[in-house]
Amino acid sequence: MAFSLPLILALLAQAPDSTPPPDPAPAASPLVVEGDLKSLCEKLPEEEPGPWSGSAALSFMLLAGNSKSLALTANGLAEYRTKVWVATFKADGVLESAASAEEDDGDVDVVAEALVASVRGERRFTPLLGVYALVYGKTDHLASVELRLDGEVGIAFTLLERDTPDGEEQLLRLDVGLHYSNEARFQYFEDEQDLPDVDLLAPGGRLTFYYPFNERLKFTQYLEVFPNILGDSRFVADSTTKFSTYITHRLALSTNLLVQLDTAPAAGKAVADVALTLGAEFEF
């Protein structure tokens, strides 16, 4: 019995501890690697553009020396677009003044003055088909147009409308409708005098084509034709061709070729007008 107590203590010292050891601390989660971060960013939803978009352009020419001349051309466009409604607002203006350096009085004559404004609204029933209404106002002193008011209603066919991988939009739209205009004429230069008003009723055709070749170069073509069916024979057509070369995402240099045709113009006026302009354009 003398050896029983030490023996018991030795056995207890070698026996396993009945209390389980604490669980090891969880390992820290690894940091997100660069590839995973890029993948997460790509999955984030992109911010959808708002319904409003537009652009504004300005060009001018200044001459000094034997003659003094200043020509200013400005145009702007704003568009509201949803899946159902499309509203387009356009304005174009031209102002040109000139004077001879030999004139001592410093008088400056306005030799060109024109302003065009239009509003077009469209209600879409399908991505392809819709109806539209258009109102239009114009004054052009060189062409002896005091005020021309136009109205048009018809059917709009959107033949192409899609986004490119660069985030740009391709558009091809055809309008077919009935067009009416009343043109009040006045001779502004030489002997000022009133001229007879002219009415036009015509089936209208209008083509709008927008095509970006890449993110830097974009092409726009606008064409409208009106063959008169009311009264005397008359054919009116307008064409605007534009190339835009973008310096930044919003700022571009634009080249515009404008051709206007009227087979029955005011007395003494040319049948066709052609204008070529180079200017700067800002897109918003």
Image: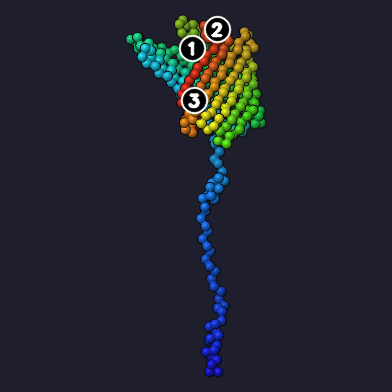
**Label whose residue precedes the other's in the sequence (3 or 2):** 2
**Label whose residue precedes the other's in the sequence (1 or 2):** 1
Q: Amino acid at mark 2?
A: Pro
Q: Give the labeled residue for mark 2.
A: 196
Q: Residue at x 63, y 24 (%)?
A: 174
Q: Residue at x 57, y 46 (%)?
A: 43
Dividing the picture into quadrants, the one containing residue 228 is: top right
Q: Is residue 258 visible?
A: yes
Q: Nearer the viewer, residue 159 or 139?
A: 159
Q: Residue at x 51, y 55 (%)?
A: 31
Q: Is residue 69 toward the left or the right of residue 12 in the image?
A: left
Residue 220 at what x, y percent from top left?
Answer: 55, 25
Q: Give the labeled residue for mark 1.
A: 142
Q: Amino acid at mark 3?
A: Ser
Q: Residue at x 52, y 62 (%)?
A: 27
Q: Amino acid at mark 1?
A: Leu
Quarter of the figure that contains the N terminus? bottom right
Q: Is residue 115 visible?
A: no
Residues at discs 3 and 1 in contact (Cβ within 8 Å): no
Q: Secondary structure at mark 3?
A: strand
Query: Compared to 21, does 194 lie above or below?
Result: above
Residue 22 at what x, y percent from top left?
Answer: 53, 71
Measured in 3D between alpha carbons, the distance from the residue under mark 1 to the one under mark 2, in whole angstroms, is 16 Å
Mark nearest the camera among 3 and 1 is: 3
Q: Is residue 97 toward the left or the right of residue 236 in the image?
A: left
Measured in 3D between alpha carbons, the distance from the residue under mark 3 to the one under mark 1, in whole angstroms, is 25 Å
Mark nearest the camera among 3 and 2 is: 3
As drawn, the residue found furthest toward the left would be 104
Q: Give the labeled residue for mark 3.
A: 254
Residue 218 at what x, y percent from top left?
Answer: 53, 28
**Label whose residue precedes the other's in the sequence (3 or 1):** 1
- Circle 3 residues within 10 Å: few <14, some 14–19, many ≥20: many
